[in-house]
Amino acid sequence: MCYEITFVIVALMSAPPAPASPATVTPGVSRPPASPPTGSDGPPAAVRPALDWRLRFAALSLIWGFSFLLIKVGTEGYAPFQVTLGRLLSGTAVLAAAMVVKRERLPRTARTWGHLAVAAFFLNALPFSLFAYAELTIPSTLAGICNATSPLWGMALSLVALSEDRPTRRRVAGLGLGFLGVLTVLGAWQGFRGLDVSGTAMALLASLSYPVGWIYVRRTLAGSGSSALSLTGSQLFLGTVQLALVTPLFTSAPGGFPLRPTLAVVALGALGTGLAVLLQYGLVTEVGPTTAQMVTYFIPVIATAAGVAVLGERLSWNTPVGAVVILAGAALTGSRPRAAGASAPPEPAAAPHRESS
């Protein structure tokens, strides 16, 4: 669930563009202005929230880790498209309220809205729906582990689509190691026996959708002039509109509103797609995208623990072993060597991440 909302938008837009700088992270995006030293890449200690960032980091990990369990519970009472629509409605309501409180303005140009519509499809409507359909036939634990492959897909795609991302031995090794972990999770040596191919394929396709959207956002929305909250709130709204148009075509109106699935869908949206974005925005602003994106590595662990402890899902040995290998590969692909005697410039976070599915 960590990629469910545009982590890259938060990373790229969390600081206003600075005057022309000799080095930029992404074409059209300047380095953020320098701030007094604080021991981290965040703002001065005096303006930090009262709640320690580590507690907010832990809360974000738990929220996104439990999202796969909530999807599973939601599909017990609703069709997958209905789960996604309810999730987007709840998440949009939370961000809309935050925008009103902070007096944020909506993007003004038709060009920005057009790009946000594409981003909403690849970062919200498509992956959320695919994960909901996937969990009809696969355990939530497997869905959470498939979600952890997003950094691997992102690495592979960025080598082709982003000229500033150059392959290194370490990153290529991480890519190979990560996909070895995928084969381990899927039990390739036993011919994928007992695996639901269609459900697993949909979960992996959902994970691939996030970096596609991330690359699109980097190419089109960097330096748009709108705040991260404005962009993500508008993106969620457009994703909601997309699902509102599609859902009636493929589902009939629910006969009732069963309590447990309804609460799961509302929590999935309000917490995993609304509150989580606000937490993530604060973390990126305070400790920087590099530290904030480490939440990615906790999500599959929490998703697996939640599926086993709460839903009684069973694990074979290859599932946790493969998950560890995937996370190791993802860590390698996201690492960048520092030049001797120089500190690396701030980088945008790789698509987490986030659903979250």
Image (tube, grey):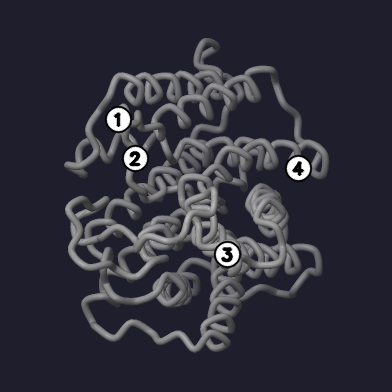
Q: Residue at the spot x=53%, y=20% of the render?
A: 192
Distance (Cα) linking label 4 and label 1: 41 Å
Task: Give the number of the disc on residue 306.
Answer: 4
Q: CB atoms at circles 3 and 1 under 8 Å apart?
A: no
State which tag comes first along the sequence, 3 or 1.
3
Q: CB atoms at circles 1 and 2 under 8 Å apart?
A: yes
Say what secondary structure mark 1 lies in: loop
Distance (Cα) linking label 1 and label 2: 7 Å
In the picture of the structure, the residue carrying the numbered disc 2 is 344
In the picture of the structure, the residue carrying the numbered disc 3 is 273
Q: Is residue 148 left or right of residue 271?
A: left
* Front: mark 2 or 4: 2
State which tag comes first along the sequence, 3 or 2.
3
Task: Give the number of the disc on residue 339.
Answer: 1
State which tag comes first along the sequence, 1 or 2.
1
State which tag comes first along the sequence, 4 or 1.
4
* Front: mark 3 or 1: 1
Q: Residue at the spot x=53%, y=54% of the render?
A: 38
Question: Where residue 267 sits: x, y (%)?
Answer: 70, 66
Q: Residues within 10 Å of mark 2 (few under 14, many from 20)?
A: few
Q: Residue at the spot x=41%, y=35% of the render?
A: 334
User: Relative to 124, does residue 178 appear above or below in the rendering?
Assistant: above
Q: How many marks?
A: 4
Q: Determine the residue located farthest toward the front in the rendered image.
A: 36
